[in-house]
Amino acid sequence: MANKTTKNPAEIFSELSLQNQILLPSDDEYKERQESFWSLYSQIEPACIVRPTTANEVSTIVKTLVASGQKFAVRSGGHTQWAGANNIQDGVTIDLQFLNWTKFDEKTRNVDIGPGARWKDVYTELEKHGRVVAGGRNGKVGVGGLLLGGGMTFFTGSRGLACDNIISFEVVLADGSIVTADATNSQKDLFMALKGGSGNFGIVTNFKMLTFVCEKIWGGFRILSKEYIGDALQAFEDFTPHVPEEVDSNILLFIAYMGKLKDVVVIEALIQVGAVENAPAYNKMVSIPAVMDMCKMTTVRELVSEYDPVPNGYYNCFYTLTIKNDVRIFNKAADLHNQVVEDLKALIPEGNFLTECLFQPFSKCIGKRSAERGGNIMGVTGQPEDGVLWVAIIVIKTAEQEKAAYPMLQKWGESVRDFASSIENGLLPWVYMNYADKSQQPLASYGAENVNKMKDVAAKYDPEEVFQKLCPGGFKISDSTL
């Protein structure tokens, strides 16, 4: 690998036919792309942004960057919350904005999706054909990051994680070669590693995915008064063991402080993908009185357009754990959440912030569904018991507020971790990458066998460690310690 260039990063593309696709800090479009990041953490400033339109252009860009030793970042939708994951200070950001397509094949009923697509656009196109994919639940999220991090979906109980529904990846490797990795060809080791291994092996320029019929779903949001926190948490604990026989019934439970309401509320997100209204699985949830009930017959496309729990234009702080399905841990997390809210009120008297204490079932049946589809690199197939994905979220507006709020988030997360650890099997090892804080090690949580497999794949396809060193953003397998 070449030594670091002394050229201005934009100059290294001067002899290539990419000039119209390069954005400089003086360009209005540069500013627009910077402001389009979901989290303010990501608005660090690259020396230039380059926007390829094809895999061949990505290849040319990678070869040029490697030859000059220029550091770079890769952006799909720009929805990772922490600084440096999808942007880079003073380097080159490869923005996959124009690798944005959803091409349905009427013969195979599979779909090709570009990494720069947004899930709302994917569902909009597939709805024309009466089909859906097991993809993202927030329509604004980009395709690439969600799939490479595993991907929770509305169909996880029946179809595994989103990455388990991928048929093949088109990938630009560190040497600029373009390969298609699937479960049967000579790149099957790369195929497996990409299912949860993030951007450690190359730049994915196309995902081929399975589709299926799902014309209508039932779902939406129920908002409850905070006096029902305990009832909602108990109902959630009672629901989780039944996920294997109720695979079409989804629940996400939020304890949240809403800045507009200036109060803590409970939000039940109920999504029944079999289109069963008030399914029996929800009996305990819907028996709790709601201040507002927005559940209805709808479509996946419509619901993902409505589901946007964390807004753009803020510092978004996340911390996640996988915990035992135990209401004692839930109550502890909720109590700590409410204390964080009081601390933030003292810091931000006007109440312009958002917090979420989020619970969603992570049944061991998800690992079984993954295994049925060939497995992935994430270690979920060996989960010994039902778990719950828990996420702590603080969303604030200014850098000054962030300096005080981020330590609160870490203390909150570590306190829940310590409490869960005090209960037998209370803390499960798996950390979901797409929710993880920069201080966490999701790749290491996949287990020693999978970490070693990923390291072997990285060494095979990227022996010069381009995607470890020249592309330093995101969770790196070279940084994963067991």
Image (cartoon, rainbow, N blue to C red):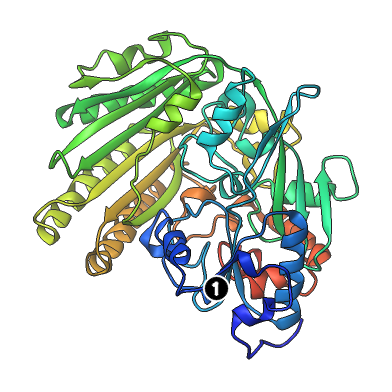
- Indicate whether 14 appears above or below 285: below
Q: Looking at the figure, which quarter contains the N terminus?
A: bottom right
Image position, residue 209 (x, y; %): 70, 34
| Label 1 element class | strand
Res. 202 in view: yes
Residue at the image position 48 percent from the left and 34 percent from the top: 137
Q: Amino acid at mark 1?
A: Cys
- In this view, the residue in front, 144 or 34, is 34
Image position, residue 262 (x, y; %): 12, 42
- For label 1, the residue is 48
Image position, residue 266 (x, y; %): 24, 31
Residue at the image position 34 percent from the left and 31 percent from the top: 253
- In this view, the residue in front, 143 or 377, is 143
- Indicate whether 203 appears above or below 233: below
Image position, residue 281 (x, y; %): 42, 13
Q: Looking at the figure, which quarter contains the C terminus?
A: bottom right
